[in-house]
């Protein structure tokens, strides 16, 4: 399962405004070596992730989180946000900027991690950062791994995205990789 989409203009903030043009969710069959289009996404689409049971595709794009069945049917908007990934208990982790403005970024947007129920309800913030936490994914042990824009010393402004981990409730946050590397990418 993969996403075929246009290239978007880089905006340094995880393409929050990107994903407004047509994109297709496609499937590659390694046996036949054929690619087929599962569906053309009718919603903003920048990224996709698959549920643990393989029955739901989560879509992030244009600052929105959607879900759709693996057959391309039942599209529904779940939340504002970006980069959705399903937790082992069924909840969704994503990032969004509703938590306020960042004093470190000239009062610009502050992106934090959120978790909601599978239907988008009971949203709650699970990270605390004055700047930006983005790109959450779920590790095999259930922890959330994500990028954090950390204002370190002697680093270029675009090379501050190190990889961090935390528990789903926001506890036990720890650097995973890259904070001492000039460009962790």
Image: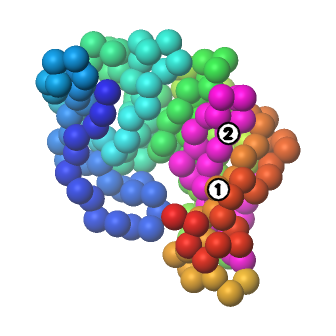
The answer to whether residue 106 of the structure is visible from this angle is no
Circle 2 is placed at which residue position? 144
The N terminus - image quarter: top left
Q: Give the magenta-colored segment's residue range.
A: 128-152
The foreground one among 31 and 136 is: 31
Residue 94, how many percent across, how many down? 56, 40
Q: How would you rate the neighbour count of disc 2 (Cα within 10 Å): few for under 14, some for 14-19, many for 20 or more?
A: many
The residue positioned 64% from the left and 56% from the top of the image is 163
In the image, is 17 to the left or to the right of 101? left
Q: Residue at x 77, y 37 (%)?
A: 167
Answer left or right for 107 relative to 36: right
Rendered location of residue 19, percent (x, y): 29, 48
Q: Residues within 10 Å of mark 1 (few under 14, many from 20)?
A: many
Residue 56 part of the magenta segment: no
Disc tally is 2
Q: Which residue is mark 1?
A: 163
Q: Nearer the viewer, residue 149 or 154?
A: 154
Foreground residue among 44 and 165: 165
Q: Does dot 1 land on a helix, a strand or a loop? A: strand
Residue 73: quarter of image: top left
27 vs 185, left or right, is left
Q: Earlier in the sequence, mark 1 or mark 2?
A: 2
Q: Residue placed farthest to the bottom in the image? A: 154
Q: Position of residue 161 (x, y in %)?
A: 59, 65
- Looking at the rendered structure, the secondary structure element under dot 2 is strand
Q: Residue at x 58, y 43 (%)?
A: 136
């Amino acid at each position: 399962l993969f996403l075929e989409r246009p290239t978007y203009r880089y905006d340094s903030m995880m393409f929050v405004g990107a994903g407004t043009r047509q994109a297709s969710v496609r499937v590659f069959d390694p046996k036949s070596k054929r690619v087929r289009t599962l569906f053309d996404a009718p919603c903003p689409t920048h990224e996709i992730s698959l549920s643990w049971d393989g029955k739901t595709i989560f879509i992030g794009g244009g600052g929105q989180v959607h879900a759709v069945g693996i057959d391309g049917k039942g599209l529904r908007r779940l939340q504002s946000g970006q980069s959705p990934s399903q937790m082992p208990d069924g909840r969704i982790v994503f990032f969004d900027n509703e938590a306020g403005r960042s004093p470190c970024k000239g009062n610009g947007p502050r992106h934090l991690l959120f978790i909601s129920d599978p239907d988008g309800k009971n949203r709650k913030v699970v990270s605390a950062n004055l700047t930006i936490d983005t790109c959450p994914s779920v590790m095999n042990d259930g922890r959330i791994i994500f990028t954090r824009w950390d204002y370190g010393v002697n680093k270029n402004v675009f090379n501050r995205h190190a990889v961090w981990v935390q528990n789903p409730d926001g506890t036990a946050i720890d650097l995973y990789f890259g904070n001492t590397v000039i460009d962790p990418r």
